[in-house]
Image (cartoon, helix red, strand yellow):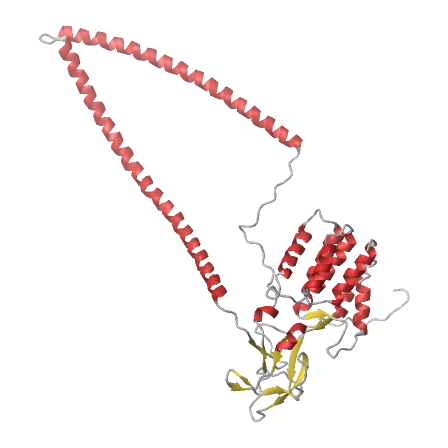
Amino acid sequence: SYNPHVRYAAAMALGIACAGSAQADAHALLEPLMSDGTDFVRQAAIIAMGLLYMQTSAGKTERVKAFREKLLKTIADKHEDVMTRFGAILANGIMDAGGRNSCASFFSKSGVLRPGAAIGFCLFSQMWFWFPLIHMFSLVLTPNALIGLTEKLKIPKNFQFKSGIKPSCFAYPEPMQPPKKEEQVKASTAVLSTASKAKALKEKKEKEAELKKATSSGDVEMDEKGSVAENASVAGAMSVAGTQASVAATPGTTVAGSVATDSVAGDDVGMEVDEQAAVAATSSASPVKDATPKAGEGESSVEEKKDSGKEAEADKAGEAARKPEPTEEILNNPCRVLKAQQQFISFPSEVEGQPVRYTPLLRGQRRVGFLLLQDNKPEEEEDLFLEDEKPAGQEDEKEPEPPAPFEWTDDA
């Protein structure tokens, strides 16, 4: 329709009519509306899609997985329209409403229209006028459970029945997992052009200052080297003159022989000093060389442990994938039974080769809600869920103290 309000109403009606069914035809009608040009039409289409995939697991259809990913992407997209993001938030909550144990329905278990549910959804659809009307959606929800009761209206623990379909088809959806530390990428902060220019100018000035400092220090070193060379040449000249004088004063020797003897002795001393320095340097450097491979070995061992852990997880996942999924499962009382799952529920006379103790009184088409059970072994002690049974560490919350008595006056 050319009228966006008609498209909005059509999407909402389709969502409540096919709630929890995950029908492919309804998905095909709603998918184009999710990219509609009008924001509130996109909102209605997303909410209707959330109604369509209530209590739907990925084992039943892969479309629900893609839709959940699209919801999270829409919610996180800051450039998306506000109304569309708001619809995505509502759809995400509707899909998991009631702890994933209830579904939206206008009718009771016996097929009777529920006036409260119809009124509740009518008020919920007017949320655009007043946001607190969103809470009226809870009137539409109905629990999906099968609970067996004894003649004393107690819940037995050992009542079992069979679901003749793969467990993954009606399993609970996987809970959302927080992102891993490796996947958390720090968002880049916005940098103004003026700030970047100022930073570049500052870096340029620092480089120029470093170059000037290096140049001045180089000139000083050259001057020092020149003075050292001059001093060395003067000292050499003086030593040569002294040597000649000593040779001339000593009879029976030649200049060549005396000079050669002194130079050889000096070379021997220099060689000994060099060898000792080399040995000391080698001995001091050897521990560092030995320590370096150890550090590398430690890092490599840590990496090997990580790789082995990943390989073990991959092997476990591969084994679970290769293991064939059973075609049926035994459910215990009480449990969740979806509307589409009711046709696969049966009450066998034997479970795992043992005769069952409880059987339904009415063996009709009723496979959801409360079932009255017949005890086939009344002489045995019953195993019941008792009211006083509580998990360890859980205690009753203390009620607050009542207010002190007072008298009301008009002046108050």
Q: Residue furthest left?
A: 252
In the drawing, does residue 317 fall left or right of residue 47? Answer: left
Q: Nearer the viewer, residue 193 or 61?
A: 61
Q: Quadrant of the N terminus?
A: bottom right
Which residue is painted at 52% across and 72% down in the image? 326
Q: Position of residue 254 (x, y in %)?
A: 12, 8
Q: Is residue 171 left or right of residue 370?
A: left
Q: Give the residue displayed 39% in from the left and 15% down from the top.
A: 224
Relative to 22, residue 376 above or below = below
Residue 94 in sight in this render: no
Q: Quadrant of the C terminus?
A: bottom right
Q: Is residue 305 left or right of residue 355?
A: left
The structure residue drawn at horizontal position 19% and vertical position 16%, both measured from the top left corner, is 263
Instruction: Name which quarter of the figure residue 205 lies in.
Output: top right
Q: Percent x, y for residue 105?
A: 74, 71
Q: Is residue 122 visible?
A: yes
Q: Is residue 263 above or below residue 147?
A: above
Q: Where does the image place residue 184, in percent across and percent down from the top left?
A: 57, 49
292 and 400: which is toward the camera: 292
Q: Is residue 230 left or right of residue 93?
A: left
